[in-house]
Every structure is written in C-alpha cells, then in structure tokens.
Image (spheres, rainbow, N blue to C red):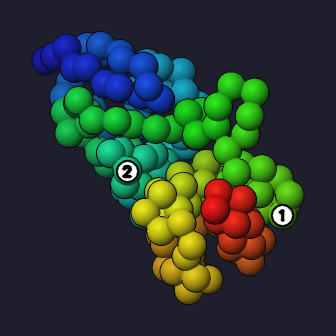
Amino acid sequence: MADAITLRVNGAEHTIRADPDTPLLYILRNDLGLKGTRFGCGSGECGACYVIIDGRAVASCDTPLWSAAGKDIVTIEGLGREGRLHPLQQAFIDEQAAQCGYCASGIMMCAAALLANNPAPTETEIRAGLDKNLCRCGTHNRIVRAVQRAAVKQA
C-alpha cells in the first residue's frame, strides 16, 4: 500500500507515494532522479549507497523509506554548492582518488559525515571511518590523502 511520505533531500522537500518499506535508495534514484547514490550489494555491506541522514552516514539500500521521513538527507548531489565543489570533491580530484568512480559517492558521504563530526581526524580515524566502504580499484591510500587534504581545507 502506497503512503504519502515527506522527505527532505538536499534541502528540498518532496512528497513521495510509495510503500513505507521501500528502500530509500530506490526513491532517491528512481523517483527523485538522484543517480549519484549507487546500488552496490543491496545489503548495506559495500558502502556504494551511503547518504547522510541527520549527520550520520547511512546505507540507503537497507534504510526503509518510513525511517527517513522528516529527517535531513544529503546525497552526493547536495554535498557541494551551486558552482562550488565541496572540499572533499575537490580533494578527490586533486589526489586522483576515484578510479572507476562507482564507490566514490558513498566514500565521500562517509568522509563528509566523519569530517563534520571530527574536523581533524588522524589517519587511523579516517581509515576506521571508511572501513565499511569497499573500493575494488585499490585507491585506498589516495582516498585517505584526499580526506586529509579536505580536512585541512575545511579548517
């Protein structure tokens, strides 16, 4: 049964008619057209689908729609501002941290949540904060350098 649920995504409110148990990822991609959030494993294990909900990085593939209602949701499309990249996005470019790019949005969202809660993380804290994100291309060291670079830029 489809219910009307209001979501606040990247600062804009959207009323969605869907089954409350629909994964948030499906709503973001299919209903709102926000394709930057990726489908990876479908069980919250790979990190490709991470978004920020009320300041925390969350796997959108196993987050039911009902649990996101009324909360602030930020996707990769909402990370930067019009005409200006977020420091993490620029750092990923500068460090060439994204090889194929499939995992990059989820990693950036986890890193953004980490930096919002800990503006000066150590390398160990960065690695722990991104531990749930898988990258098959093997750019892990560049990713860590990108997060370190973004932390300095935000300071």
Q: Quadrant of residue 61?
A: top left
Q: Is residue 125 left or right of residue 153?
A: left
Which one is in front, 95 or 60? 95
Q: Which mark is residue 49?
A: none
Instruction: Please tell me whether residue 38 is drawn above or below residue 115 in the rendered image.
Output: above
Horizontal and vertical percent for residue 32?
47, 20
Instruction: Please tell me whether residue 35 is drawn above or below residue 146 in the rendered image.
Output: above
Instruction: Please tell me whether residue 149 is drawn above or below residue 88 in the rendered image.
Output: below
Horizontal and vertical percent for residue 146?
73, 65
Look at 25% across and 20% down and name the residue there. 6
Residue 148 is at least partly visible in this image: yes
Horizontal and vertical percent for residue 134?
57, 67
Horizontal and vertical percent for residue 81?
64, 31
Q: In which quarter of the image is the N terminus?
A: top left
Look at 45% across and 46% down and name the residue there. 51
Q: In which quarter of the image is residue 68?
A: top left
| Marks 2 and 1 in Cβ contact (< 8 Å) | no
Look at 86% across and 58% down and name the residue there. 94
Mark 1 crowd level (few <14, some 14–19, many ≥20, 10 Å Cα): some
Look at 20% across and 39% down and name the residue there. 67
Residue type at the position of mark 1? Glu
Cα gap from disc 2 to disc 1, whole angstroms? 25 Å
Task: Report the residue marked by disc 2.
Answer: 55
Task: Report the residue marked by disc 1.
Answer: 95
Q: Earlier along the polypeptide chain: callout 2 or callout 1?
A: 2
Which one is in front, 18 or 36? 36
